Amino acid sequence: MECPRHGHTRATYIEDGHGLLVKGLREPREDQDPLWLFSRFDPAEVRVVGEVVTTRGRMTFGKGDRDGSVEVEADYTFVCPLIKAKPGAEEVTRTIVRREGR
């Protein structure tokens, strides 16, 4: 698998997935963008309504390519209820975000 935006290969993440994630969260930039793993919304544009985000999906695991390693696959869909962040806004829109990872 590779990052859809930047082409990082699966092998790159096997070697240093945690390090790349930490770098992307601490110093996000185009070549280490954490948004291919996480979603965020601009609070000036929308806000989440309520406290419930519906989640559906699955996670599986199996023997990895190297001795003692585990390969984890995840496929999840999140449904977030959003409302425009402007006075008087009442229409709630469901936004669907899908994340696949390996």
Image (cartoon, grey):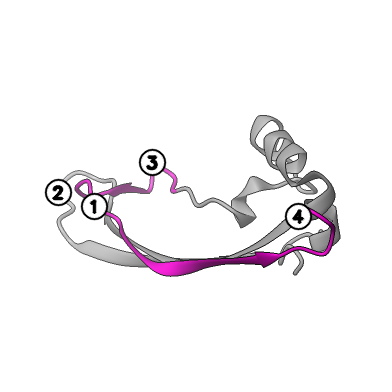
Residue flagged by tag 4: what amino acid is it?
Ser
* Three-letter code for the amino acid on which mark 2 is drawn: Gly
Q: Position of residue 25 (x, y in %)?
A: 64, 36
Q: Label 1, on which residue?
A: 52
Q: Is residue 60 visible?
A: yes
Residue 94, percent across and down?
29, 66
Q: For the C terminus, which image quadrant?
A: bottom right
Residue 65: x percent and y percent?
82, 64
Q: Amino acid at mark 1?
A: Val
Secondary structure type for disc 2: loop
Residue hosting label 3: 43
User: Separation of disc 1 and disc 3 at Cα?
Assistant: 17 Å
Magenta extent: 41-68
Q: Which mark is residue 69?
A: 4
Decide: marks 4, 2 in contact (CB < 8 A)?
no
The Cα–Cα distance between marks 4 and 1, rounded to whole angstroms, is 35 Å
Number of residues whose C-alpha sits closer than 10 Å to that of mark 1, classed few (under 14), some (14–19) or many (20 or more): few
- Few, some or many C-alpha atoms within 10 Å of disc 2 (few <14, some 14-19, many ≥20)? few
Report the residue at 14% width, 56% height from top: 90
- Horizontal side of 25 relative to 84 (left or right) equals right
- The part of the image, by quadrant, that contains residue 69 is bottom right
* Residue hosting label 2: 88
Mark 4 or 1: the one toward you: 4
Work out whether mark 3 precedes mark 2 in sequence or the reverse, and give the earlier one.
Answer: 3
Name, please, the residue furthest toward the top: 26
Q: Is residue 10 above or below residue 18?
A: below
Residue 50 x %, y %? 19, 48
* Residue found at x 18% / y 62%: 91
Q: Is residue 46 above or below residue 57?
A: above
Q: Nearer the viewer, residue 91 or 72?
A: 72
